[in-house]
Structure formats: structure tokens, C-alpha cells
Amino acid sequence: QKEVEQNSGPLSVPEGAIASLNCTYSDRGSQSFFWYRQYSGKSPELIMSIYSNGDKEDGRFTAQLNKASQYVSLLIRDSQPSDSATYLCAVNTSGGSNYKLTFGKGTLLTVNP
Amino acid sequence: NAGVTQTPKFQVLKTGQSMTLQCAQDMNHNSMYWYRQDPGMGLRLIYYSASEGTTDKGEVPNGYNVSRLNKREFSLRLESAAPSQTSVYFCASTRGIAGELFFGEGSRLTVL
């Protein structure tokens, strides 16, 4: 069973702080990694994808990947109350079909004004 | 541009009733997916269609059937609904290999 683990939270940070969201995965051969944001009562939306080791920055968001440690993280700089949501880590595992994603259960982030 | 459209958005069924959730995408995507989301369980894949004419089981396919009607449409059928199928159902699509999914707004199903 290929697993994707996230801390369920809630993670609470003050406005303007850096929020750090973490994810580990069990399949060492996994190739691609994604972060989705889901507001309460809404559908998930893709915010970051990362395919190689290192950092990838997009605005206030930075995704970090360390395949040796089987670890992927999402940093949100200058957090805003509008960033309050559940963040889902998703991994495209190497075994079997390339068409399936495995999602973590998500981390609830609350940004306090 | 509508993206991924799901119908109905809300449905209440009695145990044993059947129903079909409809999904259509207008992005010319090849692959389509049905997920269910339950509190504490995250998103779980029910069925997917890698391309028109193909369907495959996901993590939790029991009690469901699917039809990839054409490139745009992918339906999910519950033949005999059970209370355990009470959930929020999401349809999603992507152009190619899974990862960058576009989700519909979701369908909230309650089975009494």
C-alpha cells in the first residue's frame, strides 16, 4: 500500500508568518508531487507541482522536494487569512498506472489576523 | 469556460435506490477521474479513465460502475446505494499523466 502522510493539524500561524506544511511518502520510486489547496466546502485546486529535488518557487509559495528522504514540503511566506484552507499533498507513484494519484489526508491551516 | 461540470450537486437517496452522477469537461482532456472524500479519509480514487474507451478501478471501486461516454463525459453509477456511500464525490480531469487535475465542484450524496 503506497502511502502519503501529512500532519492533520490544525496548523495555526499569525498573519505575515511563514507556514510550513510537510508530507512524506512511502514509494521510493515516486516521480511527481503536487500540492492542492481546498477551501471549506469547495473542490481542490492545484497550487504547486514539483518533479525534481530542490526548491520551486511561485510567488509566496515554495515547494521543496527531497527524494532521498521521501519528503516534500510547502512553504507559504507572508501568510494571509485567505490562505486558511486544507492543503493536500498528492503523489504520482511509480508502480502500476501513471494515471493514479495518491492523496494525503490533508493539513488544515489557519492564518490568524 | 466551464471546466469540469458535475450534476447533481446534491442528492438524497434511500438505501437500495440507484442513481448516476454525471460529469463533463470542456478542456479536451484525455483522462477523467471519480474521487470520493470523507472526513478523516482524504480523497480516494473510485475509478478512472485514462483515455476515451478505457476505464480502470481505483482504490475503492466496490458498489460503483462507470461509463466513459465520449471524450467529454464520464459518469458514475450507484446501482444499489448504501449508507456507506454517503460522501462528497468529485470528478476531475487532466490532459495526460495524472497530477495536474482540474476538479468539478463536487456532488454531495446522502444515503438514508
Image (cartoon, rainbow, N blue to C red):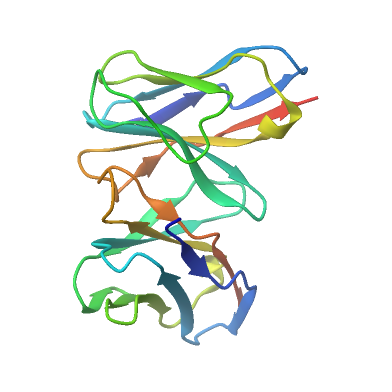
The residue lying toward the viewer, choosing from B33 and B25, is: B33
The residue at 77%/17% (across/down) is B14
- In the picture, the quarter occupied by the C terminus of chain A is bottom right
The image shows residue B20 at horizontal and vertical percentages of 54, 15
- Against B19, residue A80 (above or below) is below
The image shows residue B78 at horizontal and vertical percentages of 59, 18
Q: How many marks are shown on the rendered structure?
A: 0
Is residue A76 toward the left or the right of residue A34 in the image? right
The residue lying toward the viewer, choosing from A64 and A69, is: A69
The image shows residue B61 at horizontal and vertical percentages of 51, 31
- In the picture, the quarter occupied by the N terminus of chain A is bottom left
- Against A82, residue B35 (above or below) is above
Displayed quadrant of residue A69: bottom left
> Does any portion of residue A59 appear in the rendered image?
yes
The residue at 23%/75% (across/down) is A56
The residue lying toward the viewer, choosing from B100 and B53, is: B53
Displayed quadrant of residue A11: bottom right
